[in-house]
Image (cartoon, rainbow, N blue to C red):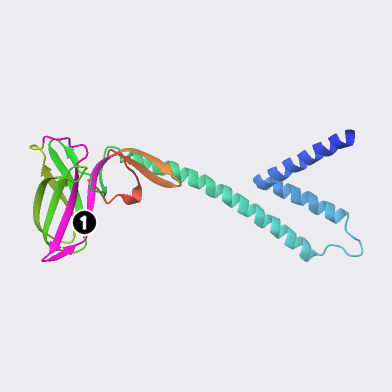
Amino acid sequence: MILSATNAVTTTTDASTKANAASDPSAAQDRFLKLLVAQLNNQDPMNPLDNAQMTSQIAQINTVTGIQQLNQTMQSMASQFNSLQVMQGTALVGRSVLTEGSSMAVADKTGKGGFELGSAATDVKIEVTTAGGQVVDTIDLGAKAAGRHAFDWDASKYTGSTDALQFRVTAVNGSTKLDSTPLSLSKVTAAGAEDGQLVLSLSNGKTINYSQIKALV
């Protein structure tokens, strides 16, 4: 029973030592040096460890130790970078941003939105709709050049709820329909980090990566 208890303690100690060596570079290096000294003390005098072998083993432990230290440094830098990103993101809280989406932002009886054209259009129309797709109003913007554009809509005569209004863009060049990207205007309400990326919470309920912002307004 005494031997079994001793073996159990030894096994536990060895496991703990290995775990410490795996997480602590200095522990791994100390363990290697102890093993190297033991190897030198017990080597065959007729076939001693040559300098090349010893140099190779020392180089290996230095490489492992260096990689572990580099990993720890990178993890620390990543943590600091995430904190810095969040601090920078808080400067955007309260700012309005344009992101891909078709939600209409309405404030002070004025609806706002935007769109992006890949090529020039001879005629652009905006249809303001309810969440169910019913057309509330149509805005004729006429000809527009390629690029990003904003628009306003007079919502003073609209008596329904403006919380869920949407819009869709129709752009043509002559008789050819053009591709367009609707852009939704929304305020940033919070900033945080997720998987190493700066993420922003918007007033329209969406959460986006910083890279998804098309423009600050």
Residue type indicated by callout 1: Glu
Q: Position of residue 40 (x, y in %)?
A: 85, 56
Instruction: Identify the magenta region.
Output: 159-188
Horizontal side of residue 159 vs 20, given as left or right: left
Instruction: Tell which of 192 and 177 is nearer to you.
Output: 177
Circle 1 sits on which residue? Answer: 116
> Which image quadrant is residue 17 in?
top right
Q: Quadrant of residue 58?
A: bottom right
Name which residue lies at 25% across and 42% down: 186
In the rendered image, which quarter contains the N terminus? top right
Label 1 residue SS: strand
Left or right placement of residue 213 versus residue 122 in this view = right
- Residue 24: x %, y % from top left: 66, 45
What kind of secondary structure does the magenta stretch mostly adopt?
Answer: strand
Locate the C terminus and report the quarter of the image it occupies. top left
Q: Residue at 16% across / 63% down in the picture?
A: 177
